[in-house]
Image (cartoon, helix red, strand yellow):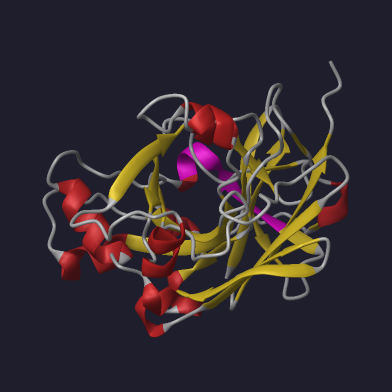
Amino acid sequence: MRLIGYERSGGIWVGRLSGDGTQVTPVTSVEQFWQDPKRWSDAVDGESTVARDGLVERPLVPPAARIICIGLNYRAHAAEGSFAVPDYPTIFGRWTASLAVGGQPVAVPVGERGLDWEGEVAVYIGSEAREVDADAAADAIFGYSTFNDLTARRAQKLTAQWTLGKNADASGPMGPLVTKAEVGALGEGLELSTRVNGTEVQRGNTRDMIFSPEAIISLVSRTFTLKPGDVICSGTPEGVGYVRTPPWLLQPGDVVEVEIERLGTLVTPVVGRTS
């Protein structure tokens, strides 16, 4: 089952995609959905479907969601940046205001030489997780989507904290949510690739993660309770742009695509600043 968020009646609603992705069946508001996502994922509001191309799509997360991002979660990616393999996951946060959807343009922030790509899998929490072990953490996973952790590298490196470089406007595009029943566990292996203007720049497999989503959820849940609608962005494989010689960063006019097995392809155009 594939779900999207979209504008409706002054709020954000959840819609179920048809098999070909062209039609949307309304489900309920985002706030109601994340109160009990397993219940609502099997329900519809009784209305007829609407054409997807006539909708304004929005990220399928509640306003209070925590977007927990994981850095250096593939050994080869850590190595290309000259980082040691961490003993614990490198965790940083995004605000929901930085999120976007497929097809939504992202501008290169002022003072940046470009944006860097980081294709990865986003993991959605579907039930409360507090002090859980890995098995219980698996039960808390509701679904997955494509994600691109587009990064402003100059801003990221200004301080020891990565927050500034990881929260540029519209720099966190997400694809439709695909329920776990349709995908399985990431440890079973999903192929991931990133392309810039049709040229492949990243290729990896989720089975090569250092820390599984279940291990990350278990660790985080010992400090704070994860709630339905929270998201774990699980990290990117090797092939990012800033480590290349010379560095290769996204410029206005470029198009970056993240394709993940069973999840689909997320397309993001890069544009210049308008003001």
Q: Residue 93 appears in which quarter of the rendering?
A: top left
Q: Assess whether residue 66 is covered by the magenta stretch.
A: no
Compared across the picture, whether 164 is left or right of 51 comes to left
**Residue at position x 24%, y 56% in the image:** 86
**Residue at position x 38%, y 76% in the image:** 208
**Vertically, is 155 above or below 219?**
above
**Residue at position x 50%, y 79% in the image:** 190
Residue 264 can be seen, yes or no? no
Pick the front one: 76 or 191? 76
Q: Position of residue 103 (x, y in %)?
A: 79, 49
Magenta span dominant secondary structure: strand
Quarter of the C terminus within the rendering: top right
Q: Residue 123 appears in which quarter of the rendering?
A: bottom left
Q: Position of residue 116 (x, y in %)?
A: 63, 47
Compared across the picture, whether 188 is left or right of 14 comes to left
Q: Residue 115 appears in which quarter of the rendering?
A: top right
Numbered marks: total: 0
Residue 103 can be seen, yes or no? yes
| Extent of the magenta region | 25-32
Q: Assess whether residue 31 is covered by the magenta stretch.
A: yes
Quarter of the N terminus within the rendering: bottom right
Compared across the picture, whether 122 is left or right of 2 comes to left
Pick the front one: 133 or 113? 113
